[in-house]
Amino acid sequence: MPLYSYKALNQKGQVIEDTIQATNKKDAATILTGNNLKVLTIKNLEGGIIIGGGISVSEKANFCRFMAMMLRSGLPLPEAVEIIRRESKNRHMQKILADVSFQTRKGRNLSSVLAQYKNDFDPVFLTIVTAGEQSGTLEKSFDYLAKQLLASYEFSQKVKGALMYPMVIVGAMIGEGLLMMFFILPRLSSVFLSLNIELPFATRLILNAGKFIGDNTLLVVGMSFLVFILTAFIFINPSARRKVILAISKFPAISKMMKEIDIARFARTLSILLKSGVPIIQSLDVSANSLAQPKWQVAAKTFSPRVAKGESLSDVLLDEKIKFPVVLAQSIRTGEETGSMDTVLEELAEFYEKEVDYSLKRITSIIEPVLMLVIGVAVGVMVILMVTPIYSIVGGLDKAL
């Protein structure tokens, strides 16, 4: 049933802002009028097209931080959610929070309402909220989530920042290549080929390619767009993305960094789940899904059944078939013996995140000179491509004279 937000006047003349579920606006107005309210405005929270809809990691972190603060101060859950909804600038977030506010007023659990939005809230988020509700420590769960989300956000920003320079350079090279291919080369080809003089094979090949592009611009643009769509599909489709990750991970430097990212993510996820009071079997199942590398994800799926049979997690990790780092297993063994596994895992996550940062700096320090060399070669090739036809034409004219 659609959800509507409304403003209305009560019998005391006070303005009330709230949400209501009804089949349509007319029914919503009828229900409000029946409750002795004078309707001022009614808006459909599910209507309209939301461009770029979604909730960013930073928005979710802020939501968790404010929820923890308001619940700690004794504010009822529906009221806390409603306050955050009014302050939010994200329409998609507003719609979700309005639904949460309405359904929690009707007696539903927060976790069951959020579970309806699995595209916005991952299993880790939902598991921690559920654990907080069951243990009566929801404000602590939101505190843990806020810290975990902020740490993930900072980590992803470091990765993006380190890759920004190479991406800008590659983007500029692609843009320059497209400019040459669609605007400059076709015009040069039409001039040079019309002179009917003998040209070197390489020059003739390039000019014919330019002529083809000029004569079939729409076809080439369509093919280029198709390549773009296929590339985008690779990153969107999980199966194709896994194959790309598998191929990329074979490079030694990339492989090392991806392992560090996976370990950091696994350790942080498991740490936050254990801190929130989630049983270790369930925590291991959820944490396994945080791994990006397929072989590690498959191996991690075996952790919870083996731990359930009585094996320690450190012994499972030391199994030669699993190939997880020995330092991870040894650190977890220390945590198991001292009863502080959540703290040890958090420290491990911080350690590996720093290692990823160092790895990124090393890789970018190598990429920068390589890119400069590639740019130099590309510029040199372009100059040769432009100058060679001119020399060929001049030579042909000399022979003709």
Image: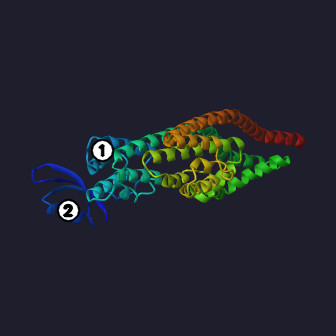
Q: Secondary structure at mark 2?
A: helix
Residue 29 circle label: 2
For the residue pair 242 and 23, the one nearer the viewer reads as 242
Quarter of the figure with the C terminus: top right
x 63%, y 40%: residue: 327
* Residue on which the image places disc 1: 71
Residue 232 circle label: none
Residue type, mark 1 in image: Leu
- Tell me how many marks there are: 2
Query: Left or right: 356 with respect to 380?
Result: left
For the residue pair 329 and 84, the one nearer the viewer reads as 329
For the residue pair 204 and 159, the one nearer the viewer reads as 159
User: Percent x, y for residue 156?
Assistant: 53, 41
User: Percent x, y for residue 131?
Assistant: 40, 52
Residue at far left of view: 12
Question: Relative to 237, does residue 312 appear above or below in the rendering?
Answer: above
